[in-house]
Amino acid sequence: MSGLAILSLALSHFRSHRAARLVFDGRPVALFGANGAGKTNILEAVSLLSPGRGLRRAGAEDLARRPEAIGWKVAARVAGLSAAHDVETWAEPGASRLVRIDGKSAPQAALARITRMVWLVPSMDRLWIEAAEGRRRFLDRMTLSFAPDHAEAVLTYEKAMRDRNRLLKDQVADPHWYRALEAQMAAAGAQIAANRAEAVARLMQAQDGAETAFPRADLAITHPEGAAADLAQALAEGRRRDMAAGRTLAGPHRADLAAVFSTKGVAADQCSTGEQKALLISLILANARALSADLGSPPILLLDEVAAHLDAGRRAALYDELCALGAQALMTGTEPGLFDSLGARAQNVLVADEGGQSMITEVQP
């Protein structure tokens, strides 16, 4: 087996799992079982093998199994970008999440040097009709997959903006207090904008010429106030307006991601529920294809309840694309029949909860 993959996964007091262990062989994985059995919790555990707060954006304290709340741990053997690694991440009660790679403490950012992940969760089904914040988060997650340093630029920008907003709320008028913060915001904001634009260009390119059952999405980054060529100047000129509002009203934190169903010329928020899901999957696949071109291996895909709103034909087409891509995709569903068209191309794993104990059984197709 070659390429990025989770080879084994062990959970201890993580969410619903007191103890669980899974072994994978690099093929797509179909995790099925009743609602509440803990399928999504397995995907969330895998997502924590990448930087950030995982696919649910949960705090470390929220990941501990209840009612024990004694701390949790995720351990995995990972076939990474250049070698295999043993990765552990955990948190004790009241403490932040820690990471260890091959027995040595490491920052979360180091996880991006080992593997890359792309995920799709049911809450994203509302991506095109929810508020802009969700689309920015989606865009930044894809951008981070191409540019791991994007997270640092976002953190720098947001910290400086919080400090500026505090000045605004306190009605501080002295320009000297603002200049250094606005210079930081302008520098980080330029990097954020450039990273996002490059990510959108890569996604559009990855859709060009792709033979797929999923529709092409034409993408654009929009700004309610217009994209300021000189953010530092825009912030300086907008201080009076921002002071009245009590917050910063211009910058990349106000950007939005617009999408159009290309062949129909219809905006994504005007498409049917099934079309919106298909457009979303199209972008996830484009992200995976672009990363595969960059890295020489497709990312690991985490696809929670991916079959929702897809008919049997589109489900089969999705599985064919995942297999052609050569990606390890971990997918969840309530019924094994949702994955019938995968056949022996996938590992089929039954996830159940019996009396508070996780029961994980590989099933032959």
Image (tube, grey):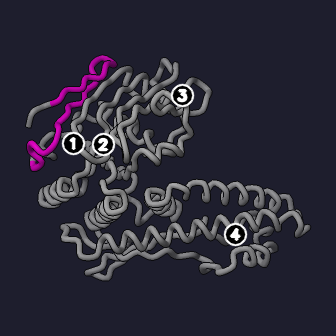
The residue carrying mark 4 is 186
Label 4 secondary element: helix
Q: Is residue 75 above or below residue 67?
A: below
Task: Tell me the residue at 38%/26% (across/down).
Answer: 11
The total of numbered circles placed on residues is 4
Q: Would residue 349 be counted in the magenta stretch?
A: yes
Label 1: how many Cα within 10 Å (few below 14, some 14–19, many 20+): few
Observer-side mark, 1 or 2, equals 1
The residue carrying mark 2 is 5
Mark 1–mark 2 CB contact (< 8 Å): yes
- Mark 1 residue type: Met
The residue carrying mark 1 is 1
Is 210 or 77 nearer to us in this picture?
77
Image quadrant where residue 156 sits: bottom right
Query: Mark number for residue 91?
Result: 3
Label 1 secondary element: loop
Q: CA distance from mark 4 to mark 2?
A: 38 Å
